[in-house]
């Protein structure tokens, strides 16, 4: 059993995604518990994989017992298992949160409850959970696979589910946002497929470990370069690297809040993980030259993204738009970690993936709680929110600490490594930029916290709000907020294996 | 140079189709035309990949016991393309349903005619 | 540190105030009496624990405990050496008195105030007991955030504006400090210790880099230490905050910045290197400018708390000047002034709080004749004002004398001129207050109060004021008592000038 853990972790949500709509025909209320159960199983399996990967460096699993490079291989290294645990954990929390969010009429406490766009009709709910399971399976498969076409398939599965999840409310704004998203992301996916085809045409193999050797010794180095660039561009659209980020503010702010949490917290990170995986596992032997100019370009794009995201976030009056621009800023951090091509910076970037994923998911879920209870989406309407919704506001404040980078949260650790890495690679200016970004993040995050905690409500605005979000929603946000703090304090357990893994990656492993 | 082009005609055709599709997606404001553009892009990539596996004298890649071994067309790209076609069809179906919803909301499929809504 | 004695006490000292915080959350709203007891018990217990370390420190021992490793090669590590203990003792003492005083002063929204007061105390003691810059930074940033609700406590527009101004200064300052720490980490070989001597040295990196790192630290900590031109938040925050919070702000929170700079000078760079790199010029010049400007601007203020705030701006720089002068007496004077000023200014702010509560007056020009209404308070005020001016038999005289002697020891009489000028200016802005209080006619007729402790003002507010005023005199006369500033400061100075 234990040797099949990886594939079970991926396949279980996949199967459940098919079963959930079928079961819901007879028992409507079983959709969410099934989802929660399956995601817990995935989480447990992913966690059980950790010691195995720690012991042997990476796990290799051959699907159908076909030997690579002919068969599809699952190759789980530390980065992979790290992401698997993160993915299943956040998906589980979002699923728990979604229960009351999308089905407010099941809230039996009789309190008033607004839904942000329109109530999600009953027939859509099993579809929602099914999509949630599919997207979790897709992400798990994406980080675990060792075959480049398999990676593309999971990437596309993840993308399609995300388009559908953004559009699921069916009203004007989500549909427009989803269309805009698709118009940018589908061509990008085609670019990625084209790149994979080019790569295959000159090397004849699809297995990433195999490709690392073949790509290095190939005669067609121009083709390899072109395919690399295309692949990076394809992933970069998903990762919202400046200037390909245009779809992000609309999609993340108009989607339902748990979907926004998933999008900002996990899916955009998959783009960067894809870039990292492809760069080091496939094209690694080409570094530092002749492809190092790509990392430099990404590095400067990331610097611009940090400033742009921060400035736009400060200018926003809509809560979810502000959080979406904050995502662009933090993605800039993560891309900077990659672009600096230094072990320390890469560790910082990957740690930010985890820390920001948790914190951003928490922020979006808190926004969802506030919007669904009060109907208020503008920041200026949030004055005095603490009196009515204390738990949600506390969770928001804790998650903001991580986004700003106040010690001892996870965000601080990520920034520490990023700045150290930038000093290490001789770009102290970029280190100062990271810290300047922190200051700007403090401006927009603490403004909201200040409004929530320290200002009285304007007029009658919060009189009709009946109270705190339901326990599953408030509990989910608090768990994430505490996790963002705990991940900072517990970093000494996570960092050494991460550092080793990044070192192996950078050496062309 | 022309012989190089003739040898690699599949590359050239695929790229031209890809560019036509990409152009359509960007320039045309009608949603249905954009979707068609996307489909052209997808088809171009599929075509390219299958053509990479093609051998001039190759036969269909089915092993018949007892037959003499002969060069076969590479089946791997064909398997890849089947998967990719499934993905492309799902994407197109989703996009079409979004376009339908768009039409329901706005009464037109032309994106330029609909002003950007301010919330 | 090899000679560090493993001890749980620093950690307990940090945690104790937060336990009172927990008590706050748990005890139901109507049991006010129980809550008050919990507050006082928390700060009293903290003080006692810190005090219990005194014999060992006086013996020269060092206590410490390594907590969790966070980033590789760095951990949250607590150490109590002489300098840290000195600051910690002042913190615990002033925190205790401020808590007791607050019981009488704070009228509304208690829970939030006392909760953040306890957190502030916790984090400040954490700062004092830090082994490395990493730990120091964590507690420093958390303390900065925890002080914010204290500043805006009154809830007026002015208070909110002052709080936001504070954040506008403090948060970028935090980022600047972090950058300095990261440069220090990178070029200092990963050792951020502020307890051992001289991790940064010319063999590690070039002089330019060393200077840049120091100036970055100076700028970052200088915001908290109210060095001109970064002191803009101080004159707004101190009047806006309630009196006990102002006492803490002036007495210990400003000192957190100065303490950081002191650690950087004495421990990260080492005094010799500090002079060799000519960095002392920057500190001495900025400190002198601040001293003079602070005193000059204090003259122009009519609002009592604003005048006291500007006075604090100048006084904290006394400390930095003393350390920059690199003489035995200068160092001694500078370090002792940390606690001396805390005592004096703390008492002054507490008096201003009593004046506000009893007479409703905030401006000096209106305070005519209040000396007859609240005589005891104004006597304490006078004692501390005289101490601030440097009158013999008070602690103020001790620090000023040592600083002057220190300036002479290194043959730089220009700084004596600065000190004298500032003393003159202090007289100019403190004496009129005393004169107005006692010798001016009040605007309206007020009844004569008798010298009766009970009728003046509540016990909670009166006793801390009295204790501080008494200490100002006692520590000025019996200077060499163990536990008083000199005993501890001389251990510190003894390490630097063996």
Image (cartoon, coloured by chain):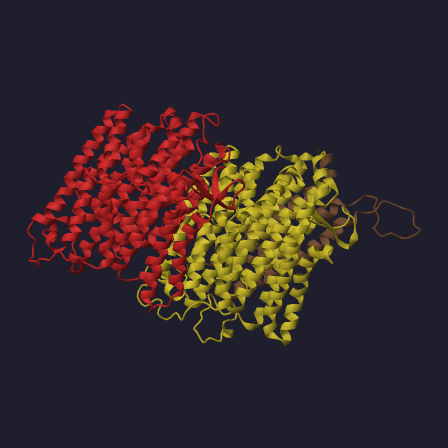
Tell which of A30 and A185 is nearer to you.
Answer: A30
Q: Residue at x 6, y 58 (%)?
A: C445
Q: Colour of chain B?
A: brown
Residue at 72% from the left image edge and 56% from the top image edge:
A2
From the viewer's perspective, is residue A42 above or below residue C251?
A: below
Q: Seen in the image, is C64 located left or right of residue C124?
A: right
- Residue C341 x %, y %: 26, 42
In the depicted structure, whether residue C74 falls above or below residue B119: above
Q: Which chain does the red colour mark?
A: C
Residue drawn at x 41%, y 44% is C129
- B119 lies left or right of B91: left
Of residues B85 and A316, the one nearer the viewer is A316
Q: Is residue A76 left or right of residue C111?
A: right
Q: Quadrant of residue C202?
A: top left
In this view, the residue in front, C19 or B104, is C19
Q: How many marks?
A: 0
* Most foreground residue, C42 or C136: C42
The percent coordinates of residue A3 (x first, y second) are 73, 54
Q: Is residue C452 above or below residue C346?
A: below
Chain coloured yellow here: A
Residue at the far right: name it: B66
């Amino acid at each position: 059993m234990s040797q099949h853990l990886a594939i079970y972790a991926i396949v279980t949500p996949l199967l459940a995604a098919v079963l959930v709509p079928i079961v819901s025909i007879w028992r409507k209320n079983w959709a969410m518990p099934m989802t929660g159960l399956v995601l817990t199983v995935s989480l447990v399996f992913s966690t059980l994989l950790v010691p195995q990967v720690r012991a042997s460096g990476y796990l290799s699993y051959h699907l159908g017992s076909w030997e690579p490079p002919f068969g599809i291989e699952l190759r789980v290294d530390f980065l992979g298992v790290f992401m698997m645990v993160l993915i299943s954990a956040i998906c589980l929390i979002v699923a728990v949160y979604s229960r009351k969010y999308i089905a407010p009429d099941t809230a039996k406490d009789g309190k008033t409850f607004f839904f942000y766009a329109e109530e999600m009709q009953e027939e859509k709910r099993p579809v929602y959970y099914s999509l949630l399971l599919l997207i979790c399976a897709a992400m798990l498969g994406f980080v675990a696979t060792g075959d480049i076409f398999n990676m593309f398939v999971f990437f596309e599965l993840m993308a399609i589910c995300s388009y559908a999840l953004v559009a699921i409310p069916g009203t004007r704004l989500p549909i427009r946002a989803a269309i805009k998203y698709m118009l940018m992301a589908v061509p990008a996916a085609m670019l990625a497929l084209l790149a994979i085809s080019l790569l295959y045409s000159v090397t004849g193999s699809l297995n990433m470990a195999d490709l690392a050797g073949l790509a290095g010794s190939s005669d067609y180095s121009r083709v390899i370069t072109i395919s690399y660039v295309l692949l990076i561009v394809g992933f970069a659209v998903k990762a919202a690297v400046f200037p390909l980020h245009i779809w992000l503010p609309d999609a993340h702010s108009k989607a339902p809040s748990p979907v926004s949490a998933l999008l900002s917290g996990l899916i955009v990170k998959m783009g960067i993980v894809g870039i990292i995986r492809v760069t080091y596992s496939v094209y690694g032997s080409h570094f530092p030259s002749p492809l190092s100019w790509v990392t430099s370009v990404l590095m400067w794009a990331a610097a611009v993204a940090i400033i742009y995201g921060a400035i736009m976030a400060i200018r926003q009056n809509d809560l979810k738009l502000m959080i979406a621009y904050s995502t662009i800023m933090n993605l800039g951090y993560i891309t900077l970690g990659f672009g600096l091509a230094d072990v320390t910076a890469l560790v910082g970037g990957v740690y930010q993936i985890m820390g920001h994923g948790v914190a951003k998911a928490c922020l979006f879920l808190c926004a969802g709680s506030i919007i669904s209870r009060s109907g208020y989406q503008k920041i200026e309407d949030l004055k005095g929110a603490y009196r009515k919704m204390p738990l949600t506001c506390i969770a928001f404040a804790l998650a903001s600490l991580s986004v700003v980078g106040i010690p001892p949260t996870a965000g601080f650790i990520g920034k520490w490594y990023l700045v150290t890495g930038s000093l290490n690679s001789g770009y102290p200016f970029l280190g100062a930029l990271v810290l300047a970004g922190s200051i700007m993040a403090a401006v927009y995050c603490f403004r909201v916290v200040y409004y929530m905690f320290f200002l009285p409500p304007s007029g009658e605005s919060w009189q009709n709000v009946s109270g705190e979000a339901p326990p599953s929603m408030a509990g989910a946000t608090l768990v994430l907020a505490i996790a963002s703090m705990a991940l900072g304090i517990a970093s000494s357990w996570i960092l050494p294996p991460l550092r080793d893994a990044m070192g192996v990656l950078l050496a062309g492993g | 140079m022309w012989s190089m082009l003739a040898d690699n005609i599949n590359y050239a055709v695929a790229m031209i189709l890809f560019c036509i599709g990409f152009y359509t997606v960007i320039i045309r404001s009608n949603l249905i035309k954009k979707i068609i553009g996307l489909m052209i892009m997808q088809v171009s990539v599929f075509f390219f990949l299958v053509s990479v596996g093609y051998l001039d004298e190759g036969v269909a890649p089915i092993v018949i016991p007892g037959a003499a071994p002969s060069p076969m067309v590479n089946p791997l790209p064909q398997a890849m393309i089947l998967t990719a076609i499934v993905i492309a069809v799902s994407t197109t179906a989703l996009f079409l349903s979004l376009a339908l919803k768009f039409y329901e909301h706005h009464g037109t499929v032309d994106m330029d005619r609909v002003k950007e809504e301010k919330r | 540190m090899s000679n560090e004695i493993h001890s749980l006490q620093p950690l307990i000292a940090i945690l104790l105030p937060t336990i009172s915080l927990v008590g706050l959350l748990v005890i139901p709203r109507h049991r006010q009496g129980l809550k008050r007891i919990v507050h006082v018990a928390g700060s009293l217990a903290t003080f006692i624990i810190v005090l219990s370390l005194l014999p060992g420190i006086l013996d020269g021992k060092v206590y410490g405990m390594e907590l969790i490793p966070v980033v590789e090669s760095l951990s949250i590590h607590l150490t109590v050496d002489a300098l840290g203990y000195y600051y910690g003792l002042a913190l615990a003492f002033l925190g205790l008195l401020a808590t007791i005083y607050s019981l009488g002063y704070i009228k509304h929204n208690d829970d939030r105030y006392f909760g953040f007061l306890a957190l502030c105390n916790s984090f400040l003691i954490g700062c004092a007991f830090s082994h490395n810059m990493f730990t120091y930074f964590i507690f420093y940033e958390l303390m900065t955030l925890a002080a914010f609700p204290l500043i805006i406590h009154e809830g007026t527009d002015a208070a909110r504006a002052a709080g936001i101004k504070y954040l506008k200064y403090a948060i970028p300052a935090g980022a600047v400090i972090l950058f300095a720490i990261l440069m220090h980490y990178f070029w200092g070989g990963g050792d951020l210790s502020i307890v051992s001597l001289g991790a940064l040295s010319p063999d590690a990196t070039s002089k330019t880099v060393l200077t840049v790192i120091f100036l970055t630290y100076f700028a970052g900590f200088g915001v908290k230490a109210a060095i001109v031109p970064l002191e803009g938040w101080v004159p707004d925050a101190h009047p806006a905050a309630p009196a006990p919070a102002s006492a803490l702000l002036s007495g210990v929170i400003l000192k957190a910045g100065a303490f950081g700079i002191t650690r950087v000078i004495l421990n990260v760079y080492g005094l010799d290197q500090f002079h060799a790199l000519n960095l002392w010029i920057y500190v001495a010049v900025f400190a002198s400018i601040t001293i003079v400007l602070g005193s000059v601007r204090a003259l122009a203020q009519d609002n009592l708390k604003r005048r006291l705030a500007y006075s604090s701006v100048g006084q904290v720089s006394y400390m930095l000047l003393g350390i920059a002068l690199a003489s035995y007496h200068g160092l001694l004077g500078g370090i002792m002034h940390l606690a001396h000023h805390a005592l004096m200014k703390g008492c002054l702010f507490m008096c201003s709080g009593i004046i506000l509560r009893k007479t409703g007056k905030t401006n000096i020009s209106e305070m005519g004749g209040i000396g007859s209404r609240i005589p005891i308070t104004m006597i304490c005020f006078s004692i501390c004002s005289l101490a601030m001016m440097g009158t013999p038999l008070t602690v103020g005289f001790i620090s000023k004398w040592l600083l002057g002697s220190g300036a002479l020891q290194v043959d730089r009489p220009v700084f004596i001129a600065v000190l004298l000028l500032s003393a003159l200016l202090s007289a100019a802005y403190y004496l009129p207050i005393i004169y107005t209080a006692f010798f001016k006619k009040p605007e309206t007729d007020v009844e004569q109060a008798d010298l009766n402790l009970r009728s003046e003002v509540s016990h909670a507010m009166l006793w801390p004021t009295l204790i501080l005023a008494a200490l100002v005199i006692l520590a000025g006369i019996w200077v060499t008592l163990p536990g008083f500033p000199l005993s501890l400061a001389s251990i510190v100075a003894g390490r630097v000038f063996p």
